[in-house]
């Protein structure tokens, strides 16, 4: 959450931004305008990638300031394009649109929350996998993660509906495993920031997969591949969870070689840009895939259904398989083959 008291106006956040091109004076001028509650050019240029919060040396969380100001000013492309999605979310909470879908599981197993994602947003067969066998599965508009609405001009949704989402999950009476990062962010990060109650135990997908693979080591065939990883922007809120991902990669026998667009320097999957600046989106995708190929990757690994969907086109264009993290595990467990005809 933005904390003005931590900002020393150093400008590092926007100087390091890959998409907006500010020198130090320009960066400081933009942040100053935002801190004064005024419109600023950055609001229209920002792709909502969240990297600047990682670049900020003091933990002031500048991307949160930008997202709040984008919503407040209301005229930048991301906010304009995001209007239908925001309205649909409000209807979900206020009118019951997109009602709960629940597949009951074993009483002693946790529930897998898809947030508001549909089952078919994930690769075919995901929910039949041994990875999730016996788990209750739940999704629906009133389980939306909310945190991801910063990409659609809806920074205030967390505060408005966050406790309701957490209470809906609590009513299941189960521990929760989040298959999507932003749901976890609501429970793990935003709940602290906004003082929400989280009356259940919860776990991130990466930790869950690490545990499952560690418990089923004998069923794993090491893949012996190199992979590039496309970080979901929401992981910027909890970078420490990449340690679980690194363990997953080790367990399934894939190497994550160093590359330019990695960890704090990861680039946006471009989902927020497709409808606002397609030319920039295509350019970022090209650089991202070329970087992945240059580091010797046999595939690019995604962990967010939005990144996974957006990458279908460049994956085909650059002939670099786009493998969802659960599918990577399923391949190692013998449920699926490595993508045919690929590297
Ligand atoms: S969120 Fe991303 S695009 Fe926006 S200012 Fe920060 S680094 Fe730049
Ligand atoms: S938000 Fe952080 S990086 Fe940006 S000007 Fe303030 S202290 Fe510097």
Image: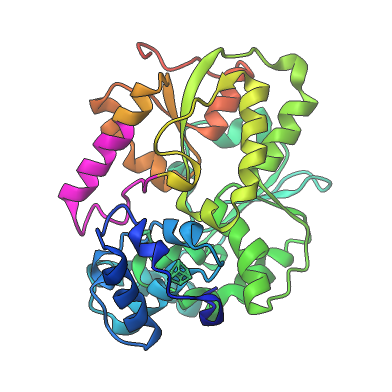
The residue segment tinted magenta is 267-289
Q: Position of residue 111 (x, y in %)?
A: 70, 50
Q: Is residue 288 magenta?
A: yes
Q: Quadrant of the C terminus?
A: top left
Towards the viewer: 291 or 83: 291
Q: Is residue 217 above or below residue 78?
A: above
Q: Position of residue 89 (x, y in %)?
A: 43, 70
Instruction: Report whether residue 97 is seen.
Output: no
Ligand 1's image quarter is bottom left
Q: Position of residue 170 (x, y in %)?
A: 73, 66
Q: Position of residue 285 (x, y in %)?
A: 28, 39
Residue drawn where x is 31% and y is 59% of the image: 47
Towards the viewer: 226 or 328: 226
Q: Is residue 217 magenta?
A: no
- Residue 38 lies in quadrant: bottom left
For the rendered model, the colour scheme is rainbow
Residue drawn where x is 50% and y is 57% of the image: 54
- Residue 249 lies in quadrant: top right
Residue drawn where x is 66% and y is 40% of the image: 243
Q: Is residue 93 above or below residue 310?
A: below
Q: Is residue 217 left or right of residue 122?
A: right
């Amino acid at each position: 959450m933005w904390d003005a008291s931590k900002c020393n106006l150093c400008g590092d956040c926007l100087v390091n931004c890959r998409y907006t091109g500010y020198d130090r004076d320009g960066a400081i001028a933009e942040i100053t305008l935002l801190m004064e509650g005024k419109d600023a050019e950055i609001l229209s240029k920002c792709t909502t990638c969240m990297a600047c919060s990682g670049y900020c040396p003091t933990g002031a969380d500048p991307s949160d300031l930008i997202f709040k100001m984008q919503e407040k000013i209301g005229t930048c492309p991301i906010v304009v394009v995001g209007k239908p999605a925001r309205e649909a979310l409000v209807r979900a909470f206020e009118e019951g649109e997109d009602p709960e879908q629940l597949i009951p599981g074993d009483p002693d197993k946790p529930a897998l929350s898809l947030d508001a994602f549909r089952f078919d947003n994930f690769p075919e067969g995901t929910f039949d996998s041994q990875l999730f066998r016996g788990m209750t599965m739940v999704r629906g508009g009133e389980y939306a993660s909310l945190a991801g609405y910063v990409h659609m001009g809806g920074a205030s949704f967390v505060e408005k509906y966050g406790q309701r989402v957490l209470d809906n999950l609590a009513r299941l009476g189960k521990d929760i495993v989040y298959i999507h990062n932003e749901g976890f962010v609501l429970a793990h990060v935003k709940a602290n920031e906004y003082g929400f109650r989280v009356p259940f135990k919860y776990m991130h997908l990466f930790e869950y997969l690490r545990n499952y693979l560690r418990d089923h080591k004998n069923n794993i065939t090491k893949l012996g591949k190199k992979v590039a990883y496309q970080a979901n922007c929401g992981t910027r809120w909890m970078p420490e969870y990449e340690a679980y991902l690194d363990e997953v990669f080790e367990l399934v026998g894939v190497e994550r070689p160093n590359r330019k667009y990695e960890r704090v320097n990861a680039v946006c999957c471009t989902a927020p840009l497709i409808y606002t600046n397609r030319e920039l989106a295509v350019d970022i995708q090209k650089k991202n895939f070329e970087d992945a190929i240059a580091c010797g990757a046999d595939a690019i690994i995604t962990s967010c259904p939005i990144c996974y969907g957006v990458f279908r086109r460049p994956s085909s264009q650059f002939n670099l398989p786009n493998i969802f993290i659960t599918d990577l595990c399923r391949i190692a467990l013998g449920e699926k083959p490595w993508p045919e005809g690929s590297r």
